[in-house]
């Protein structure tokens, strides 16, 4: 199994599949799922956000299904990946990501299905390979949930060791502020101008950054404005985010941030508009929930003790939970994801595949 897993991992990461460009890899995994015996379709999610492929959905078996899910896309630089296997570790050649996030999940599911099929009959499963997860969870956002029968889902997409079960994830509120001032010549009549940059700077300086408490973070990550040094700038924009494991805390901070930005801008002669948007909702799954109990048992059968964690990141799990499918995210053992130093131990690929098999045959 190990050799085949590594070969399939290399095959799939070698197909270019940055977010929005998943057509080729989607076609490849569709034929693999068909070969395993699943009924396979692609939805039209891609057409809703400009991607060239939709989510891949495969179904097999009778009875109450569970979902196993991973995403097909990867972050940049994710083209021309040339994986190097050395001493039980797979790395990229250093100029791209490895795309173990999330091909580790994809190959674990494919290999786990093949193994599980040897047990007859294969229990009901819905396989979902999403597209454009890395760009604001667009694939899962546009998935048609009325077509799914499962009540629970396992998302193989956490960059932590196999055995990690992510049971809570934050609510993420994005905000964007536009500060309007008054243009003037910066040297001829600066007294007639109101600098939007200066007003924005005062507003930003009043916002907390980083950990606000032990379950909440905030950041301003984008700032733009101005045309030339001899113009008093009349328009500046900045964007930020608030994430909290407590949803009410996120919305409370969003309101406070809006009030602070508006009043600081006014105090400096400018006007501010602030838009806030819930990017995704958080979730907290009870340790006694069936979705947790099943994976703890499945891990136990392959000799791994479950570790519960919360994350401050979002994933398809946030969207699934918001659509009424009780979901946890599982560690696949990849490390240093979203960097050219990303790597994964072959033993973790094997453990993930065993876990898929164990989940499906319980
Ligand atoms: Zn991922």
Image (cartoon, rainbow, N blue to C red):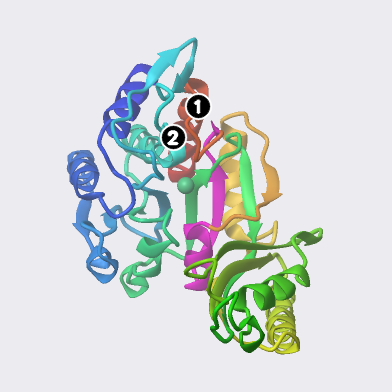
Residue at the far front: name it.
188
Mark closest to the chain's N terminus, 2 or 1: 2
Question: Residue at point 57% right, 56% down?
Answer: 291
Q: In the image, is residue 357 part of the stretch drawn in magenta?
A: no
Question: Residue at point 59% right, 37% down?
Answer: 299
Please tell me the numbered disc located at residue 241.
none
**Contact between labelled residues 1 and 2, with CB atoms less than 8 Å apart:** yes
Percent from the top left, x then y, of residue 260?
74, 82
Front one among 257 and 352: 257
Front one among 226 and 30: 226
Instruction: Count numbered badges in the picture.
Output: 2
Percent from the top left, x then y, of residue 344?
50, 27
Neighbor class of circle 2 (other Cα within 10 Å; few <14, some 14-19, many 20+) is: many
Q: Quadrant of residue 267?
A: bottom right
Reply above or below: 343 against 3. Answer: below
The span picked out in magenta is: 315-335
The residue that disc 1 covers is 344
Q: Quadrant of residue 286?
A: bottom right
Considering the numbered disc 1 on the image, is that residue within a helix, a strand or a loop?
strand
Q: In the image, is residue 324 part of the stretch drawn in magenta?
A: yes
User: 284 left or right of 128?
Assistant: right
Considering the numbered disc 2 on the image, is that residue within a helix, a strand or a loop?
helix
The residue that disc 2 covers is 100
Residue at the far top: name it.
87
């Amino acid at each position: 199994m190990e050799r085949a897993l590594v070969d399939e991992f290399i095959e799939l990461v070698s197909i270019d599949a940055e977010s929005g460009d998943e057509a080729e890899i989607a076609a490849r995994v569709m034929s693999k799922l068909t070969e395993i015996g699943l009924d396979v379709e692609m939805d039209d999610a891609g057409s809703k956000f400009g991607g060239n492929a939709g989510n891949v959905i495969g179904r097999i078996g009778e009875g109450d299904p569970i979902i196993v899910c991973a995403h097909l896309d990867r972050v940049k630089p994710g083209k021309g990946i040339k994986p190097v296997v050395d001493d039980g570790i797979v790395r990229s050649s250093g100029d791209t990501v490895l795309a173990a996030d999330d091909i580790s999940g994809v190959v674990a599911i494919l290999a786990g299905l093949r193994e599980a099929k040897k047990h007859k009959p294969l229990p009901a499963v819905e396989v979902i390979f999403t597209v454009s997860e890395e760009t604001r969870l667009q694939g899962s956002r546009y998935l048609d949930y009325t077509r799914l029968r499962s009540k629970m889902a396992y998302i193989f997409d956490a960059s932590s060791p196999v055995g990690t079960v992510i049971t809570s994830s934050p609510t993420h509120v994005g905000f964007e502020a536009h500060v309007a001032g008054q243009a003037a010549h910066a040297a001829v009549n600066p007294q007639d101008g109101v600098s939007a940059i200066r007003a924005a700077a005062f507003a930003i300086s009043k916002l907390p950054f980083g950990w606000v408490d032990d379950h909440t973070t905030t950041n301003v990550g984008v700032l733009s404005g101005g045309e030339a040094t001899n113009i008093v700038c009349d328009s500046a924009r900045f964007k930020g985010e608030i994430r909290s494991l407590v949803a009410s805390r996120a919305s409370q901070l969003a309101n406070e941030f809006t009030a602070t930005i508006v009043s600081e801008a006014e105090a400096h002669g400018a006007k501010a508009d602030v838009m806030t948007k819930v990017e995704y909702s958080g979730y907290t799954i009870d340790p006694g929930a069936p979705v947790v109990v099943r994976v703890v048992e499945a891990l136990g059968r392959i000799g791994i003790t479950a570790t519960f964690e919360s994350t401050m990141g979002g994933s398809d799990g946030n969207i699934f939970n918001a659509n009424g499918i009780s979901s946890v995210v599982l560690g696949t053992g990849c490390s240093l994801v979203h960097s050219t130093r990303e790597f994964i131990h072959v033993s973790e690929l094997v453990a993930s595949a065993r876990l898929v098999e164990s989940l499906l045959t319980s």
